[in-house]
């Protein structure tokens, strides 16, 4: 039987506003131990880099435009404190994709530092939206993500109220 959930499968955009229970769980770590409880510093590199899209809503719209499945194992992180989406991309592609690309998209190339989630959820500053699969990384294509950001921007412009 068709239910509203079946008719409208969950989208990346639906992850924009976590429920209060999820936010409470992500915020539970006191600031002085935040990095040791729900997230940790990691050095970018070793096969991956990252693209950071601001604001988070824009990054989620881009992932929807790409048609990536939520449970596809593509490592995607939300930084709720900075309102940013962080997508892990193949090493060597972040700088090239972001160069001359959409405003509000920046790269974290090899050698940069990133706060990554630890445990099943992470923390307010680094929460998994999509956890990576073990043994077979399925990184987001950096060039496709930048193109999808531009596409999402154009779609948003089409729906902007007339002044």
Image (cartoon, helix red, strand yellow):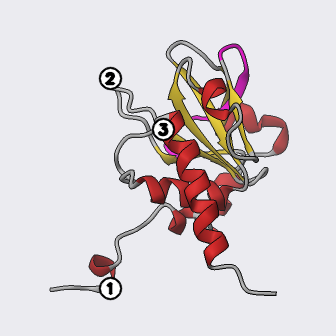
* Residue position marked by numbered label 1 in the rendering: 4
Element class at badge 2: loop
Q: Residue 159 lies in what quarter of the image? A: bottom right
Q: Is residue 14 above or below residue 40?
A: below
- Measured in 3D between alpha carbons, the distance from the residue under mark 2 to the one under mark 3, in whole angstroms, is 13 Å
Q: Is residue 58 left or right of residue 71?
A: right
Q: Is residue 19 magenta?
A: no
Disc 2 residue crowd, few under 14, some 14–19, many 20+, Cα 10 Å: few
* Residue position marked by numbered label 2 in the rendering: 135
- The tag earlier along the polypeptide, 2 or 3, is 3
- The tag earlier along the polypeptide, 3 or 1, is 1
- Measured in 3D between alpha carbons, the distance from the residue under mark 1 to the one under mark 2, in whole angstroms, is 35 Å
Q: Is residue 82 above or below residue 101?
A: below
Residue at left offset 49%, top offset 60%: 12
Q: Is residue 1 left or right of residue 138?
A: left
Q: Position of residue 13 (x, y in %)?
A: 53, 65
Image quarter in which the N terminus is found = bottom left
Mark carried by residue 97: none
* Stretch in magenta: 110-121
Disc 3 residue crowd, few under 14, some 14–19, many 20+, Cα 10 Å: many
Q: Is residue 117 magenta?
A: yes
Q: Position of residue 46 (x, y in %)?
A: 53, 12
Residue at left offset 72%, top offset 56%: 55
Element class at badge 1: helix
Image quarter in which the C terminus is found = bottom right
């Amino acid at each position: 039987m068709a239910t509203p959930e079946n008719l409208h499968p969950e989208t990346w955009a639906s992850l924009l506003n976590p429920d209060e229970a999820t936010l409470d769980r992500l915020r539970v770590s006191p600031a002085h131990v935040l990095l040791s409880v729900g997230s940790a510093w990691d050095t970018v590199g070793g096969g991956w880099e990252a693209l950071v899209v601001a604001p988070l809503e824009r990054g989620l719209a881009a992932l929807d435009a790409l048609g990536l499945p939520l449970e596809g194992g593509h490592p995607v992180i939300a930084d709720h404190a900075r309102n940013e989406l962080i997508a892990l991309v193949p090493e060597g592609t972040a700088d090239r994709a972001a160069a001359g690309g959409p405003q509000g998209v920046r790269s974290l190339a090899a050698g940069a530092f990133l706060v990554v989630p630890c445990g099943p959820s992470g923390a307010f500053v680094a929460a998994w939206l999509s956890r990576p699969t073990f043994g077979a990384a399925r990184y987001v294509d950096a060039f496709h993500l930048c193109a999808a950001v531009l596409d999402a921007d154009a779609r948003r412009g089409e729906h902007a109220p007339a002044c």
